[in-house]
Structures are given as structure tokens and as C-alpha cells.
Amino acid sequence: MQNNDLLAICHRYLDCLNRQDWDYLGKYVADNVSYNGQFIGFTGYLNARQNEFRAIPDLYFNVQLVMANESMVACRLNFNITPSHDFLGLPVHGKLISFSENVFYEFDNGKISKVWSVVDKAAIEVQLSQ
């Protein structure tokens, strides 16, 4: 695919997440999707995203940087969220936190088939220590 095509698909995918438009998520995510090297399948992926929105009512995916080649998109996403409970094993409990996530999406036939994600947990730990 062309880089611009993948960028457009990625932006529509993130918009779909932000709208919590679960009926259309399958348009962007493959049935055989893996996350950080582990096969979770579409249902596992869908459940994980839905659980995130339940635990974090103000969750919103803000794109800071995005780049693509013929099969992959790399994004730096920014978050300003208020998780209601623990987050990444940290006792957040309703405190506003800000952090970034670096995520890579590999596409197969126009759908996300592999996701690699790294969250800046250290930034959250610093905020909680203040």
C-alpha cells in the first residue's frame, strides 16, 4: 500500500477508537491480530480496548507524530487521562496523568495485523511521586 493510504487508515482507526465505534473496529483490525508478540485475535483486541474505555472514561488517543512505509505505521500518542483504578500496576485512582505511547502497527491487506506498544510508565511514576 502507499504510505498515504496507511496514514489515512491509521487516522480513521484512531478516530474509530475515540468514538468507541466498536461496530466498525473490524474494518481496521484483522481477525488474527497480535499485540506485543502475542496472538489475541480480534475479539481479544476488541475486549481490551473496551475495557480500557470502561476503566478510563476520559480516554482519548491524541496523535503527536505519525509516519508510514509500505506496510507499517509508527505513532507517538499522547494521553491526558484519569484512570479510575490502578493503571499499569500503579495506584493512580482518579488522578490526572499525562504520558506518551509509542506504537507500531503492521498492516496486512489494509488491516492492522500486528501491534507493538511501549507506554512511558516512568513519566507516570514521576507524576505519582509528586
Image (cartoon, rainbow, N blue to C red):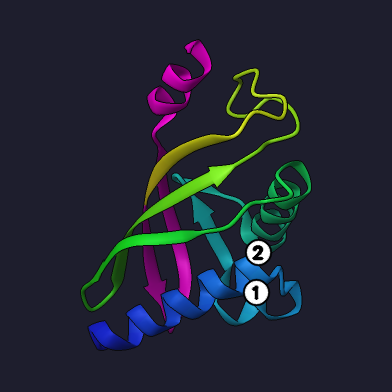
Residue nearest the observer in this picture, 104 or 130: 130
Q: Which residue is mark 2?
A: 42
Name the residue located 57 percent from the left edge and 65 percent from the top edge: 32
Give amino acid for label 1.
Leu
Per the image, is 128 magenta? yes
Location of residue 96 with respect to 16 vertically, above or below:
above
Quarter of the figure with residue 16: bottom right
Q: Position of residue 128 (x, y in %)?
A: 53, 17
Disc 1 to disc 2, how far (Cα)?
Answer: 9 Å
Give amino acid for label 2.
Phe
Q: Do residues under tags 1 and 2 come within 8 Å of each other at their CB atoms?
A: yes
Magenta residues, as a range? 103-130
Per the image, is 10 magenta? no
Quarter of the figure with residue 17: bottom right
Q: Position of residue 103 (x, y in %)?
A: 38, 52
Q: Which residue is mark 1?
A: 25
Q: Position of residue 95 (x, y in %)?
A: 64, 28
Name the residue located 47 percent from the left edge and 26 percent from the top edge: 124
User: Of helix, strand and loop, which one carries label 1?
Assistant: helix
